[in-house]
Amino acid sequence: MTANLHYVSSGPADRPALLLIHPLGSSHVFWDECAAIWSKRFRVVAVDLRGAGASPIPDRNWKADEHVQDVVSVREELGLRDVIAIGCAIGSLVAARYAAADAAVVRGLVLSNTTTELGEASRARHEGRLALVREKGMEALLPTVIDMAFDGLPKDERYTRYMERFRHNDPQGYGALALGMVGTDNSDILSKLNVPTLITVGAHDTLLPPELSRNVHALVKDSEFAVVEEGAHFMPYQAPLQFAALVSDFVKRRVNFYRP
């Protein structure tokens, strides 16, 4: 199968792979600081979901299971056999479904700023945003959506950098990803997962508050839970040193292919 997604791979090719799935409004660069740490020890593969980054822009809304098949195509093209899937926010919903679909090669799972489902309330929110985007472009969402994602954190260089990247999203791709994920319900999948799982969230996340990640933790039987005080909705980007350390420690303790 030829991979349908753009992706960036780093680190030793013969090591277990961390397969990274970004949130809405971002791309593989979301993971750059974490990837620089992990690639000293792991193979690191960061994808651009369809509609984001350099991946194809769909002409319709792209559903969660279609994203999963795209991710599987990357894994197969690279021949990865020992995988830890890591996703943030909407990316965490894809990562959980991917872990279930590709269970034969998935050895661990990390879900950051996650939830069991994206319901109809999120549809209304996204449709409102997309109406503005169609009229005025991505700039119409700034700085509001970034302020919500960085709630409780300083408006520093990291905040500014994220906002500049957000400006360059393709409006159609952003909409196809946002609306395609609405209605995704992972409750049944999460309750059946049988893989060591780390669930972590930023303490300041107001979009997917910590209690939603706790609900996921309650469903996944072999899971751990951690709150990072320095993070909000994009915790791996906002607190990369803390997040990278949490993941590395989790893999060392819980995933048996770990090699120092």
Image: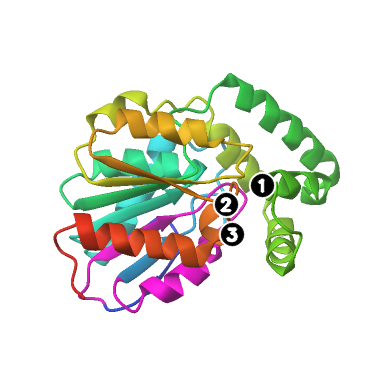
Q: Nearer the viewer, residue 215 or 3?
A: 215
User: Among all residues in the image, which is located at the extreme top?
Assistant: 120
Q: Is residue 132 left or right of residue 208?
A: right
Q: Where is residue 164 drawn, in percent x and y?
A: 74, 63
Q: Residues within 10 Å of mark 3 (few under 14, many from 20)?
A: many
Marking on residue 37: none
On whether residue 14 falls in the magenta region, the answer is: yes
The region drawn magenta spans: 13-42
Q: Nearer the viewer, residue 217 or 58?
A: 217
Q: Residues within 10 Å of mark 1 (few under 14, many from 20)?
A: many
Q: Where is residue 152 drawn, in percent x and y?
A: 70, 48
Residue at (42% x, 64% y) in the render? 244
Q: First in sequence: mark 2 or mark 1?
A: 1
Q: Nearer the viewer, residue 39 or 128?
A: 39
Q: Is 148 rendered above or below residue 119?
A: below
Identify the amino acid type marked 3: Gln
Label 1 element class: helix
Label 3 element class: helix
Callout count: 3
On whether residue 4 falls in the magenta region, the answer is: no
Q: CA distance from mark 2 to mark 1?
A: 7 Å
Q: Which residue is mark 1?
A: 149
Q: Marks 1 and 2: in contact by CB < 8 Å?
A: yes
Does residue 55 appear anywhere in the picture? no
Q: Residues within 10 Å of mark 2 (few under 14, many from 20)?
A: many
Q: Which residue is mark 3?
A: 238
Label 2 element class: loop
User: Among all residues in the image, which is located at the extreme front?
Assistant: 229
